[in-house]
Amino acid sequence: MRAMSLRAPATPLVLEERPDLHPGAGEVRLDVLACAVCRTDLHIVDGELVLPRLPLVPGHEVVGRVSELGAGVTGLRLGQRVGVPWLGGTCGACPHCMAQRENLCVNGQFTGYTRDGGFASQVVADARFCFSLEGVALSDVDAAPLLCAGLIGWRALKKAGDAQVLGLYGFGASAHLVAQVAVAQKRRVFAFTRPGDTAAQAHALSLGASWAGGSDEDPPEPLDAAILFAPVGALVPLALSAVRPGGKVVCAGIHMSDIPSFPYALLWQERQLVSVANLTRADGHEFLAMARDLPLQVRTTVYPLERANEALQALRSGELQGAAVLVP
């Protein structure tokens, strides 16, 4: 098998030849068909998240076919197309798991972070955390971003409640999927991009957004809720100032730059500031069920596996529209 390996923080990934993988009990081996590149992968590679071990194979938006079953695996079969998300395993016994909040498991495992991920030709995954992609009418490349950009976006959208006027800050892989879901739910979407990014604004409008502008602009009317996909702490006060009294700002990223101080008046009148952590399997089943019925338009840029560093740099520079996807 081939894998792009991170050997030290803030260094380029290295292409390695490794022995073929074999699953343990309760696991499956997948032949990777595609793996999208997430901003969390970038935070990991750039050393902005504490690394649990090295070397490490990043990647947690994996589409693959089951090529070997470990002992005791049921519910999956050889040749089945499945997706592997960020949440790669939970203990099932801690207070969070017992309260059906497995996204907060104190012993959680994470694909491409605490266990090797999908920037490779093979990956081993916990069978319980593989999602069937049967009935999802998207190519392998287009399905890959659903496994995090879609799932985390969906959880963030649920956190936003029944907001009818919804602001999306940062119009990348997650926002371009969430915008389509929100529009299908008859919400009005206002898209905030990097100032001057007319291409991203045009993309948002083409997907049904009611308005698109720079993050330094005021929306046409107060927002019921805002979701921050851009990992920029300075956007938090801007978003709070844009939501109406009683509104909510949802921070959807796993990492964000420091939030600057802001006057209490921005939070007053029962505005809420909340975060999203990871996902649950229920989120995955809900979103993928919806994706089987909603014809999502997924914008992707394909890179061969060995050009993973170029894909990461494109994401780092902000030049991508949609998602980068690696193909072995």
Image (tube, rainbow, N blue to C red):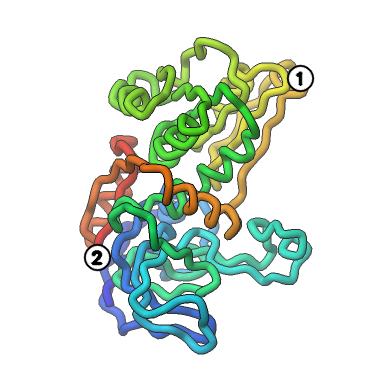
Check disc 2 and report its element: helix, strand or loop: loop
- In the rendered image, the quadrant that contains the C terminus is bottom left
Few, some or many C-alpha atoms within 10 Å of disc 1 (few <14, some 14-19, many ≥20)? few
Label number found at residue 328: 2
Q: Amino acid at mark 2?
A: Pro
Q: Amino acid at mark 1?
A: Trp
State the residue at coordinates (47%, 53%): 288
Q: How many marks?
A: 2
Label number found at residue 268: 1
Q: Position of residue 104 (x, y in %)?
A: 67, 57
Spatial CA span between label 1 and label 2 = 50 Å
Report whether residue 327 is seen. yes
Q: Nearer the viewer, residue 107 or 179?
A: 179
Q: Is residue 240 above or below residue 147?
A: above
User: In the image as oriented, which residue stretches furthest toward the top?
Assistant: 220
User: In the image as oriented, which residue stretches furthest toward the bottom?
Assistant: 71
- In the rendered image, the quadrant that contains the N terminus is bottom left
**Left of 227 or right of it: where is 215?**
left
State the residue at coordinates (53%, 82%): 26
Check disc 1 and report its element: helix, strand or loop: loop
State the residue at coordinates (55%, 72%): 128
Mark 1 vs 2, N-terminal side: 1
Q: Position of residue 248 (x, y in %)?
A: 66, 28
Q: Position of residue 123 (x, y in %)?
A: 38, 73
State the residue at coordinates (30%, 48%): 324
Verify CB contact (< 8 Å) between mark 1 and mark 2: no
The answer to which quarter of the image holds residue 176 is top left
Few, some or many C-alpha atoms within 10 Å of disc 2 (few <14, some 14-19, many ≥20)? many
